[in-house]
Image (cartoon, grey):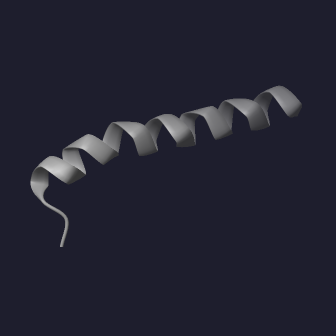
Amino acid sequence: MPTWLGVVGLAPSIAGLVAVMLLRRERNA
């Protein structure tokens, strides 16, 4: 079980990666 601090620290990074992937898909399309 990840700690709350771990989740709070990983959330922004994961959201950033997803945003970058979506932006790349839009640019390619």
Residue 9 horizontal side relative to residue 25, left or right: left
Total labels: the figure holds 0
Q: Is 26 located above or below residue 1 in the figure?
A: above
Residue located farthest toward the bottom when viewing the structure as drawn: 1
Q: Is 16 located above or below residue 5 in the figure?
A: above
Q: Which sits in the foreground, 2 or 21?
A: 2
Residue 15 horizontal side relative to residue 1, left or right: right
**Quadrant location of residue 12?**
top left
Q: Residue at x 66, y 40 (%)?
A: 21
Q: Which sits in the foreground, 20 or 2?
A: 2
Residue 12 horizontal side relative to residue 20, left or right: left
Q: Which sits in the foreground, 12 or 22?
A: 12
The percent coordinates of residue 1 (x first, y second) are: 18, 73
Tell me the quadrant of the picture where the C terminus can be found. Answer: top right
Q: Residue at x 44, y 45 (%)?
A: 14
Q: Residue at x 32, y 45 (%)?
A: 11
Q: Is 1 located above or below residue 28 in the figure?
A: below
The percent coordinates of residue 22 (x first, y second) are: 66, 38
Residue 4 horizontal side relative to residue 12, left or right: left
